[in-house]
């Protein structure tokens, strides 16, 4: 074998290894477009998706999206003047992913090193009670992966149980959108199936949050990373990567 052929062969093998070994993160989103059975519109929080997505992509991770029904998901809370928002509003590859989210039955947990639950009002519906998504997240965690969530996305991990039947986060510090920032008199809140804060505490969590709010508050406890509100989206993603790289 000539020297040139050996170089070409080595390059091909190296390229194949680089692609095949790329680590993947699963983003969990919701198909819900109204608050409960009302006509009031809701959606997935665009910023909580793209701010974390951008961090993972820049570090070489591949992202897949799933939702309870698969297919297109509603997007809202968009800031067209924000450079990261604008970047992904014009990214055909990204937009195709959120228009063609995977059905849970088509997701193989073994393919992912972490799961990330984004928020927005939609996250309170469809995702928390979805047993297939719970199974996927539990398997990723059992395989030494990381579970992460931000804001109302924390609702998605509320009902996940371990082999003992306890909440996966029992005894651990977690965060999410706290009751003090919810407007409990508004119709939107009355449609929520539960309070994230109260349900987490009832299940044995040490629920933590900043009373200031919107100040990049997040907590890390083992392989669970959770943020209080949209301002923590990038930091949650960075901490997930930090944990993955430390293993």
Image (cartoon, rainbow, N blue to C red):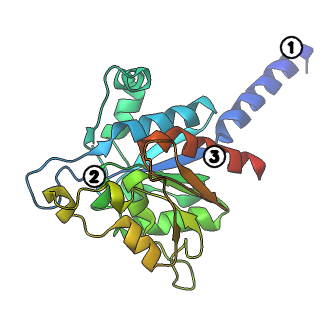
> Viewer-nearest of labels 1 and 3?
3
Q: How far is disc 1 from disc 3 in space, using C-alphas?
A: 43 Å
SS at badge 1 = helix
Task: Using the rendered image of the protein, determine whether residue 163 is visible from the camera's viewpoint.
Answer: yes
Q: Which residue is mark 2?
A: 121
SS at badge 2 = helix
Q: Point out residue 60 in the picture as x, y percentages from the top left corner.
A: 63, 33
Discs 3, 2 touching: Cβ within 8 Å: no
Q: How far is disc 2 from disc 1 in space, using C-alphas?
A: 58 Å
**50 versus 92 height, above or below:** below
Residue lying furthest bottom in this view?
164
Left of 90 or right of it: where is 39?
left
Q: Point out residue 55 in the picture as x, y percentages from the top left corner.
A: 56, 34
How many numbered discs? 3
Q: Which residue is mark 1?
A: 4
Q: Which residue is mark 3?
A: 239
Task: Check residue 99 in the rendering and tell me which mark sits there, or answer none.
Answer: none
> Viewer-nearest of labels 2 and 1?
2
Discs 2, 1 touching: Cβ within 8 Å: no
Mark sitting earlier along the chain (2/1): 1
* Residue found 51% across the figure and 58% down from its top: 108
């Amino acid at each position: 074998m000539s020297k040139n052929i050996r170089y070409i062969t080595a390059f091909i093998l190296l390229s194949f290894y680089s692609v095949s070994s790329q680590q993947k993160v699963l983003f969990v989103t919701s198909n819900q477009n109204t608050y409960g059975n009302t006509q009031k519109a809701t959606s997935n929080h665009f910023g909580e998706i793209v701010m974390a997505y951008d961090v993972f992509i820049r570090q070489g991770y591949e992202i897949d999206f799933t939702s309870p029904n698969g297919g297109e998901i509603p997007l809202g809370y968009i800031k067209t003047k924000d450079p990261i928002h604008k970047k992904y509003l014009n990214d055909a590859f990204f937009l195709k992913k959120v228009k063609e989210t995977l059905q849970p039955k088509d997701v193989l947990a073994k393919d992912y090193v972490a799961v990330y639950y984004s928020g927005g009002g939609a996250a309170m519906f469809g995702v928390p009670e979805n047993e297939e998504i719970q199974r996927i997240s539990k398997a990723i965690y059992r395989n030494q992966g990381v579970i992460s969530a931000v804001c109302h996305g924390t609702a998605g991990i509320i009902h996940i149980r371990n082999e003992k039947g306890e909440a996966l986060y029992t005894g651990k510090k977690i965060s999410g959108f706290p009751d003090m920032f919810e407007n409990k008199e508004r119709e939107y809140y009355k449609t929520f199936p539960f309070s994230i804060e109260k349900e987490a505490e009832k299940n044995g969590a040490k629920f933590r949050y900043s009373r200031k709010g919107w100040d990049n508050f997040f907590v890390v406890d083992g392989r669970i990373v959770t943020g209080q509100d949209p301002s923590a989206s990038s930091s949650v993603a960075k901490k997930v990567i930090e944990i993955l790289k430390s293993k």
